[in-house]
Amino acid sequence: MATALNQFIAVGRRKNAIARVYLRPGGSGKVIVNKRELNEYFPTTWRQNSVISPFGVTETTGQFDVVINATGGGQTGQAEACRLGISRALVKFNEELKKPLRDAGFMTRDPRMVERKKYGQPKARKRFQFSKR
């Protein structure tokens, strides 16, 4: 879906994190997350690599400017939500990129969520100490 600005919009989710991605063709490869540079928002290199890995898989590095609004969750959840959003936006840009992204595992939303705490227990699975007498 291209808008008047000729940008492609997609949403990525992971755990409780949501990332709205705006992919703008013809850019210089700049990635902005929550109005900050990528390396400033995600200081660790493996999270930075996780976010921009769809460009490496599709060999489109440096062809797009990306603006991301990420909310909720933690840093890893937000980074992987950004990755999914960028992958979905790339597919909207060019449908032929879907196969390499799917083969790399970037088009599947990770369904794992935190298990809820149950009543009568200190945590989701942990039990209070059993006392026979």
Image (cartoon, grey):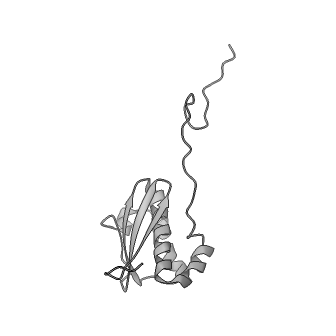
Work out which residue is located at the far top of the displayed protein and give it.
133
Residue 47 x %, y %? 47, 64
Left or right of 18 in this view: 124: right
- Occupied quadrant, residue 101: bottom right
How many badges with numbers are in the image? 0
Residue drawn at point x = 53 percent, y = 82 percent: 95
Residue furthest out toward the bottom:
26
- Residue at 58%, 54% (x, y): give it: 112
| Quadrant the N terminus occupies | bottom left
Residue at 50% from the left image edge and 84% from the top image edge: 94
Say which quarter of the image contains residue 105.
bottom right
Depth check: 93 or 71 in front? 93
Say which quadrant the C terminus sits in.
Answer: top right
Q: Position of residue 90 (x, y in %)?
A: 48, 78
Q: Is residue 111 above or below residue 124?
A: below
Instruction: State whether residue 133 is above or below residue 1.
Output: above
97 or 30: nearer the viewer? 97
Looking at the image, which residue sits at the far right?
132
Q: Position of residue 5 (x, y in %)?
A: 31, 81
Toward which corner of the image does residue 31 lie, by quadrant?
Answer: bottom left
Does residue 44 appear to the left or right of 36 in the view shown?
Answer: right
> Residue 65: percent from the left, percent from the top?
37, 78
